Image (cartoon, helix red, strand yellow):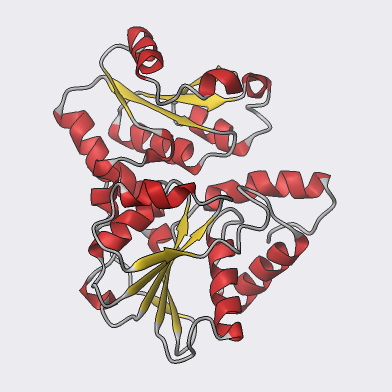
Amino acid sequence: MLKIKTLENIHLNSQVAIKPDYLIHPTVSGNKFRKLKYNLKKAQSGNYKGLITFGGAFSNHIAATAAAGQELKIPTVGVIRGEELITQIESNPSLRYAQSCGMHLEFVSRLTYKNKTDPAYLQQLLETFKDYYILPEGGTNALAVKGCEEILTLNDQSFDIICCSVGTGGTIAGVINGSLPTQKIIGFPALKGDFLKEDICKFATKSNWELWGDYHFGGYAKVDSKLIKFMNEFKLTYNIPLDPVYTAKMMYGIFQSIQSGKISQTAKVLAIHTGGLQGVEGMNIRLKKKRIEEIV
């Protein structure tokens, strides 16, 4: 089984601390480790022959699943959104890394990819990859939430507010379940829209949470020069790298909310750094093409 490192929180100042979950494993970092933990146990105990999962061009989940499969010697298949990407593997750091870990990449059209939760399509995949264990896009299911419930520890009970980036909703659901009822859990969605509330409610067992949707910077994987400048200054000041899709937007939201008074200056805040740093190289390729400042 994958081994985890136990790390102390990093205090940025007297009010805000970061839980450096991105450092718990060298290749399967942060929430992806948490989500995979019990799914991998089930795959191994159930004598499955391998893992199938889904993701886009720069997916953290695809990269993490490939790395975990390599370490545990479990064959992995990544169903990738976008047939055109088959010719771009070498120029795409995430896909190149996944392939180098031994993952078989199955490229499908965007129309086909929409069937990723359809039972008939999943059965079709299993006819090709017999006895494989299927993980959903982003890795979120009940076992993933169980893993994310272990993010918070006894040492975190002194914090008033726990902040978390939100993608598919599994990580924050686990954080909610692992929190004290007196703590406030704030999610910072990386996507536009209110549909996440329904997804989170499928797994969350407490009502001490809310989503702050004003810091997505235009939507999933959308950034601007203001966010990149914030990331680079943050790294220079605290020597902590952020990723542009999730954690940078969360930290920007926290700092802005403290400054505006939305978060009280007396509240003790813990921000969970969920990782995602493998995506920085790919984002810099996009930024360079647009002639926007790159991430350092």
Residue 86: image quadrant is top right
Residue 251 vs 94, above or below: the answer is below
In this view, the residue in front, 89 or 139, is 139
Q: Position of residue 174 (x, y in %)?
A: 29, 56
Q: Position of residue 103 (x, y in %)?
A: 44, 26
Could you tell whether 39 is left or right of 25 in the image?
Answer: left
Instruction: Name which residue lies at 28% across and 66% down.
Output: 152
Instruction: Name which residue lies at 24% across and 69% down.
Output: 153
Q: Is residue 163 visible?
A: yes
Residue 122 vs 59, above or below: the answer is above
Q: Is residue 5 visible?
A: no
Farthest-out residue, left: 45
Farthest-out residue, right: 291
In this view, the residue in front, 91 or 189, is 189
Q: Position of residue 74 (x, y in %)?
A: 30, 27
Q: Position of residue 252 (x, y in %)?
A: 60, 70
Residue 124 vs 227, above or below: the answer is above
Could you tell whether 12 is left or right of 19 in the image?
Answer: right
The quadrant the N terminus occupies is top left
Could you tell whether 51 is left or right of 155 in the image?
Answer: right
The quadrant the C terminus occupies is bottom right
In this view, the residue in front, 31 or 265, is 265
Farthest-out residue, top: 127
**Total residue callouts:** 0
Residue 190 vs 133, above or below: the answer is below
Residue 7: image quadrant is bottom left
Could you tell whether 188 is left or right of 268 in the image?
Answer: right
